[in-house]
Image (cartoon, rainbow, N blue to C red):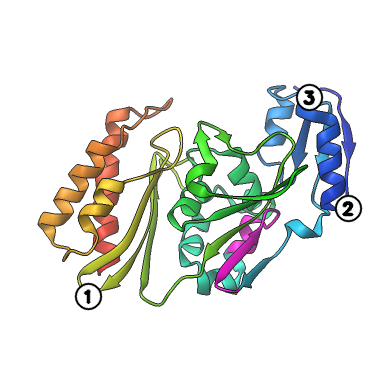
């Protein structure tokens, strides 16, 4: 199939893009990398009256350190994150996650902001942003607002972005020397959507982990934190008994949802597999 007819505009600045978005209302769609949007257009799952191409807007680009925060612009591609020295130094979790994202051609074009705004529960970046306590910087007609990753992802493919708003950037606290990270996903083939995945961070002192954050993805309608497991592990010496309790807590707390190829029971099992591997990696 081919996409239905639509108008196309390419603003040069953020205020112009916001004005166009406000004028067109819910009939407009933003396009950056377009790795998801183009497919939905061609299958006529989306039929906007106008496409607003935001790829020339400088305010949405770049990776930088601002004070004690790492800032990633919405238009930064997956490959730019993979190749960035700032990411390697200040956000090792993102560096570890990038190779799991689809394939090189998609990583070259797909954007950080596009992934977050789409809110795919099987995507890597929403889970990482939740784990790293990210703040989303959003602009709309009323000006700028900031919202935590915990409040940004609402439901399946649903975020707190309003139709007339644009995700401009995301900010994270930069990594500290005592932090350790783990990222892994289980998929049928490399580059496929994950059956289940885990993004984790903690501060390590010997065999003790503190300030733990364990976020599972591709198991529910949104990325979900295993708060009970985090509370069990925080501040206690990690041994086989504690790992077993944490695994049981995570499986009990998180109610996995089946997808078209994997049962809820399989995902529930993999939650424990990933957490056990992750904890052993973090403390090793």
Q: Position of residue 253 (x, y in %)?
A: 26, 38
Q: For numbered disc 2, what is the local secondary structure?
A: loop
Image quadrant where residue 60 sits: bottom right
State left or right for residue 116 relative to residue 213: right
Q: Position of residue 30 (x, y in %)?
A: 76, 39
Q: Which residue is mark 3?
A: 2
Q: Position of residue 275 (x, y in %)?
A: 27, 51
Q: Is residue 232 above or below residue 251?
A: below
- The answer to which of 121 and 225 lies nearer the viewer is 225
Residues tagged 3 and 2 counted as in contact (Cβ below 8 A) = no
State left or right for residue 111 relative to residue 6: left
Instruction: Report the residue at 48% width, 38% height from top.
Output: 121
Residue at the extreme bottom: 177
Q: Position of residue 236 (x, y in %)?
A: 18, 63
Q: CA distance from mark 2 to mark 1?
A: 51 Å
Q: Which residue is mark 1?
A: 206
Q: CA distance from mark 3 to mark 2?
A: 28 Å
Instruction: Report the residue at 10% width, 55% height from top.
Output: 241
State left or right for residue 165 relative to residue 9: left
Q: Is residue 256 above or below residue 168?
A: above
Instruction: Report the residue at 58% width, 63% height from top.
Output: 82
Q: For numbered disc 1, what is the local secondary structure?
A: loop
Q: Which residue is mark 2?
A: 12
**Marks 3 and 1, the one that precedes in the sequence:** 3
**Marks 3 and 2, the one that precedes in the sequence:** 3
Count how many numbered circles sit on residues in the image. 3
The quadrant in which the N terminus is found is top right
What residue span does the magenta drawing correspond to?
A: 67-81
**Marks 2 and 1, the one that precedes in the sequence:** 2
């Amino acid at each position: 199939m081919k996409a239905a007819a639509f108008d196309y505009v390419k603003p040069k600045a953020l205020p112009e893009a916001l004005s166009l978005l406000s004028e067109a209302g819910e009939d407009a769609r933003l396009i950056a990398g377009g790795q998801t949007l183009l497919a939905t257009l061609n299958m006529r799952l989306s039929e906007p009256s106008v496409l607003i191409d935001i790829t020339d807007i400088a305010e949405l680009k770049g990776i930088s350190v601002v004070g004690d925060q790492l800032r990633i612009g919405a238009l930064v591609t997956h490959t730019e994150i993979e190749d960035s020295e700032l990411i390697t130094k200040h956000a090792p979790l993102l560096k570890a996650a990038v190779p799991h994202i689809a394939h090189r051609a998609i990583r070259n074009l797909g954007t950080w902001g596009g992934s977050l705004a789409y809110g795919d529960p099987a995507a890597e970046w929403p889970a990482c942003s939740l784990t790293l306590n990210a703040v989303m910087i959003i602009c709309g007609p009323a000006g700028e607002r900031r919202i935590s990753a915990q409040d940004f992802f609402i439901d399946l493919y649903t975020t707190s972005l309003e139709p007339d708003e644009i995700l401009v950037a995301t900010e994270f606290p930069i990594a500290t020397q005592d932090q350790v990270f783990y990222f892994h996903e289980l998929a049928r083939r490399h580059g496929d959507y994950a059956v289940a995945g885990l993004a984790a961070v903690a501060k390590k002192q010997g065999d003790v982990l503190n300030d733990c954050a364990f976020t599972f993805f591709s198991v529910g309608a949104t990325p979900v934190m295993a708060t009970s497991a985090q509370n069990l592990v925080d501040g206690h010496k990690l041994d086989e008994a504690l790992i077993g309790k944490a695994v049981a807590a995570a499986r009990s707390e998180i109610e996995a949802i089946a997808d078209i190829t994997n049962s809820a029971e399989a995902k529930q099992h993999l939650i424990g597999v990933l957490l056990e591997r992750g904890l052993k990696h973090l403390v090793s």
